[in-house]
Image: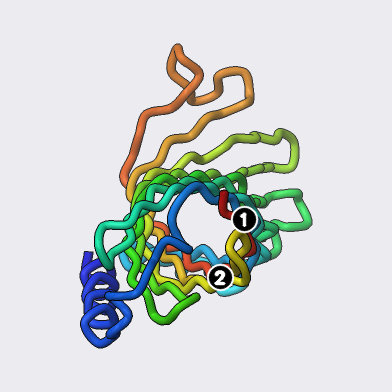
Amino acid sequence: MKKFAALLAAGTAMAVATPALAQDNSTFTGFRVEALGGYDVSKAGSDVDNDLNDEDDQSIDGFMYGVGVGYDFAFGGVLVGLEGEISDSTAKTEFNDGDLEDLGLGVRVDTGRDLYAGARVGFLAGDNALVYVKGGYTNGRYNLLAADGTNEIETNLDLDGFRVGAGAEYALSENMFIKAEYRYSNYSEGEFDFQNNGFFDDDTGESGRFDADLDRHQVAVGVGLRF
């Protein structure tokens, strides 16, 4: 929540310091669709650490890519928008237990799809520029494969949490724009979905929910069209 409050404070400060509130913000209203790409890193949160094996990666990173949609409304000099996004990432790693690697023991973790639904609040920073803060709900998926030398267990880990961020958007024309933003996500609740004949599952095929603490940082750029 401290990160969210800081982002909101920064956005408010930019709005107060910018005399562009009186400008016409119709350039940034209406329905939009965008393609996104950037850097993605996931790591254990402050409540979690792996001190068992120094050879294990403490974080996984890769290239994030996805698409987003949104609709923005103007309220005087303030822009308020609803938005959604689906993305994926190339981030992956393998955790191996030292010398036991030769016996086939280990775990592979790949990032899966990431869903986001939220809102943003923006302020004009010039005739064709917008600065904004954002926040909402996110559901991330990580694909896990564990092996003990004989058997393999494959499962998905679905995580629920929140996302906050801040960015800037620039209108290249009446219908086309580019943007750049930083996003922070924290996943605080998770659930395994095993794909191995109900192993560790309940009758529905899903395990019980549990507390988690996983941080995700992303720097994304995008290009889009407004209709």
Return the mark for residue 171.
2
Residue 224 placed where, x, y %? 62, 58
Q: Amino acid at mark 2?
A: Ala
Please indicate whether residue 101 sits to the left or right of residue 163 in the image. right
Residue bearing the label numbered 1:
225
Give the spatial CA distance, label 1 vs label 2: 10 Å
Please indicate whether residue 145 sits to the left or right of residue 69 in the image. right
Residue 55 placed where, x, y %? 62, 72
Quadrant assignment, res 4: bottom left
Residue 154 placed where, x, y %? 65, 35
Element type at mark 1: strand
For the residue pair 109 and 82, the one nearer the viewer reads as 82
Q: Amino acid at mark 1?
A: Leu
What residue sits 32% from the left and 80% below the top?
A: 20
What residue sits 53% from the left and 47% below the top?
A: 69
The quarter of the rendered structure image containing the N terminus is: bottom left
Element type at mark 2: strand
Residue sitting at the far top: 203
Q: Mark 1 or 2 closer to N-term?
A: 2
Residue 140 appears in the figure: no
